[in-house]
């Protein structure tokens, strides 16, 4: 087995006195799409934020291609190859599509590459090319999600983390987002995906983890997770009984 792109070992994360992650370990191999599932409040976003350097674990290790990144600031982690597309997108609404993308490229590489990367991203998201000079805030929710993902891709990440990319989108747009994720996977991108739409996420995933109140309740093949827990029950929060650790 090759060295994991990402290897999270026994991380504990707290918000002040509130424990959010209680010993979470997971890994992502090169070219894998790994799904992280769990009910609201289980700690999924906290895992992604800890990896991205937004939150500092109380203890535990986070290795990126073998290098310790726990405790590094977000800019450093980003420079080392991790892109987080956060929950809620967080694009800059008053900046144009072009400016939003330019900001993503800032600091990570030479300006000369910007034009080529832009063409690449436009190949994936033709709608962004059409709306290049418009403020990001005028895009639809789905288009803003595309812009957020495009921004995450501009730095050529070795690990792309997506936090609930289909949340709040129309069914058509949800289809487009999943098509896009499949497309990125097809290009060999290494992806850690958090999704409310567990059924769709598990269809695409090579492996999956289930988080339950800050601990892992399952890690393995997606179809095994589907067998183990009724997907609907995960979202009602009634899973756990009878599921293996
Ligand atoms: N800034 C914060 N301060 C205090 N507690 C927080 C903070 N952010 C999250 N939490 C708590 O940490 C736990 C995990 O939150 P997290 O956002 O990681 O969950 P999640 O699985 O991403 O949920 P969702 O599906 O709703 O996005 C929750 O109990 C949440 O209330
Ligand atoms: Mg979340």
Image: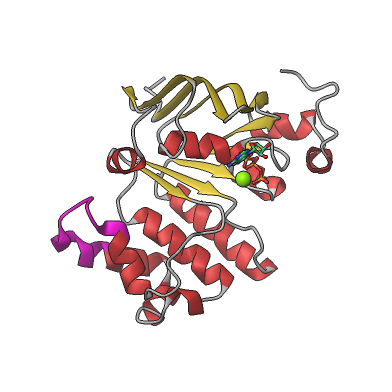
In percent of width and height, residue 124 lies at 41, 65
Q: State left or right for residue 39 relative to residue 70.
A: right
Q: Quadrant of residue 35?
A: top right
Q: Name the residue nearer the viewer: 53 or 163.
A: 53
* 209 shown above or below 233: above
Residue 232: tell me if it is visible. Answer: yes
Q: Name the residue nearer the viewer: 107 or 4.
A: 107
Q: Quadrant of the C terminus?
A: top right
Q: State left or right for residue 236 relative to residue 86.
A: right
Residues drawn in magenta: 104-117
Residue 112 among those drawn in magenta: yes
Q: Is the magenta region chiefly helix, strand or loop?
A: helix
Q: State left or right for residue 191 relative to residue 227.
A: left
In percent of width and height, residue 151 lies at 38, 59
In percent of width and height, residue 112 lies at 14, 62
In this rendering, the count of numbered labels is 0
Q: Quadrant of ligand 2?
A: top right
Q: State left or right for residue 43 relative to residue 121.
A: right
Residue 33: tell me if it is visible. Answer: no
The residue at 45%/61% (across/down) is 148
């Amino acid at each position: 087995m090759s060295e994991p792109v990402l290897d999270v070992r026994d991380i504990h994360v707290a918000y002040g006195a509130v424990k959010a992650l209680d010993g979470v370990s997971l890994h992502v191999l090169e070219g894998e799409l790994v799904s992280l599932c769990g009910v609201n409040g289980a700690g999924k976003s906290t895992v992604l934020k800890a990896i991205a350097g937004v939150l500092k674990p109380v203890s535990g290790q986070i290795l990126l291609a073998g290098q310790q990144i726990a405790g590094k600031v977000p800019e450093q982690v980003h420079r080392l190859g991790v892109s987080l597309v956060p929950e809620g997108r967080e694009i800059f609404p008053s900046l144009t599509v072009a400016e939003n993308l330019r900001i993503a490229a800032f600091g990570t590489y030479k300006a000369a590459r910007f034009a080529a990367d832009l063409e690449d991203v436009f190949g994936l998201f033709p709608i962004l090319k059409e709306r290049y000079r418009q403020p990001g805030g005028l895009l639809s929710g789905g288009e803003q999600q595309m812009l957020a993902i495009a921004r995450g891709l501009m730095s050529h990440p070795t690990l792309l983390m997506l936090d609930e990319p289909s949340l709040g989108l129309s069914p058509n747009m949800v289809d487009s987002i999943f098509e896009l994720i499949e497309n990125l996977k097809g290009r060999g991108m290494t992806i850690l995906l958090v999704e409310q739409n567990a059924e769709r996420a598990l269809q695409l995933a090579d492996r999956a983890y289930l988080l339950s109140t800050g601990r892992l309740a399952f890690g393995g093949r997606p179809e095994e997770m589907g067998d183990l827990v009724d997907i609907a029950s995960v979202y009602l929060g009634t899973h756990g009984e009878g599921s293996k650790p």
